[in-house]
Amino acid sequence: MLLLSSASIHTLSLQGRLRLQAAIERDQSADQLRSAAQAFTTMASGAQACLLQWPSVDWGLLQNSCSGSEPISLQEGSVADQTWRLLSWQPAAGSGDLRLALADGRRASFRLELAADGAQILGIGAVQLIGRDRSEPFS
Amino acid sequence: MSLPEVLISFILLASSSSAALGVWSQATATWQQSRTLQHTADQLELMQLASHRWLRLHGAERNLLIPGLDPCLLDASAVAVALDQAVPLPQGMTRQWVVDADQLGIWQELSALNVDGEVQLQRRQLVSPAAYGLCRS
């Protein structure tokens, strides 16, 4: 009885350790996604900043409105050893919703604070992990 | 109960108690390690959040950019000095700022060290001045 209860407590402590390890991996995964979002903000300055005023689905139609901009530079990139891809950008009044994915399918969304003209990022919100998409790997 | 039966019962009880004590102490050690690691992970997360909060609220008040670069880039030394003052690290933690090879920003590397000075846990995140409205166009 004594041995069985000790074994149960040991199992519980091991489960706690595994949960903690998973949480640490989740934090590090969030760091990679946050880094990708930070890289996006770097790319979304200068000539590309104009694109922030429109949803990413419309970027291909904006040659006249955002002359000199290159939407492709906001649609994918790499940071350290990780390749990222833009899933969507959806601006609203004073903010925008950024969705990114890493090459292995991990995805996250961020709320970006925008200037009144909608063409400058002023702040970036906390990462919201939205799970892994294994169906659409990209290189 | 005969004497041999008493002896066997005693031996069984002693050995199972000893084994239970061993398992119990192992469980306690695992639990204690997890608790310490959790505390360390929480501290790293707090430091990271505090750095971002400071950059967001006070980044524009200090001259943190390298002049004349496009896209603009944070001066890693200036950021290190400012953050060391504003967000001091607890004991057993180190922070390094490393310029990204592609000039996308600078990397904040927060490390928690164990008693031997080895890295126990590390968080690494890119920081871009554009994310805090520091690159005025």
Image (tube, rainbow, N blue to C red):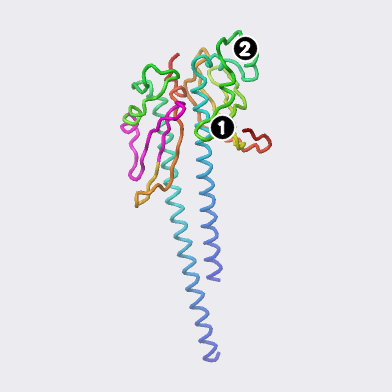
Q: Name the image quarter holding residue A106.
A: top right
**Is residue B74 rendered to the left or right of residue A9?**
left
Task: Look at discs 1 and 2 and give the one toward the viewer.
Answer: 1
Q: Residue at x 34, y 39 (%)?
A: B89
**Residue B92 percent coordinates (x, y):** 34, 45
Disc 1 crowd rating (10 Å Cα; few below 14, some 14-19, many 20+) is some
Observer-nearest residue: A67 or B29? A67
Q: Label 1 belongs to which residue? A: A83
Q: Label 2 belongs to which residue? A: A62
- SS label for mark 2: loop
Mark 1 vs mark 2, CA separation in Å: 26 Å
| Residues rendered magenta in the picture | B82-110
Count the numbered circles shown: 2
Screen quadrant of the N terminus of chain B: bottom right
The chain letter for the residue carrying disc 2 is: A
**Is residue A134 rendered to the left or right of residue B82?**
right
Residue A34 belongs to magenta span: no
Q: Residue at x 67, y 34 (%)?
A: A136
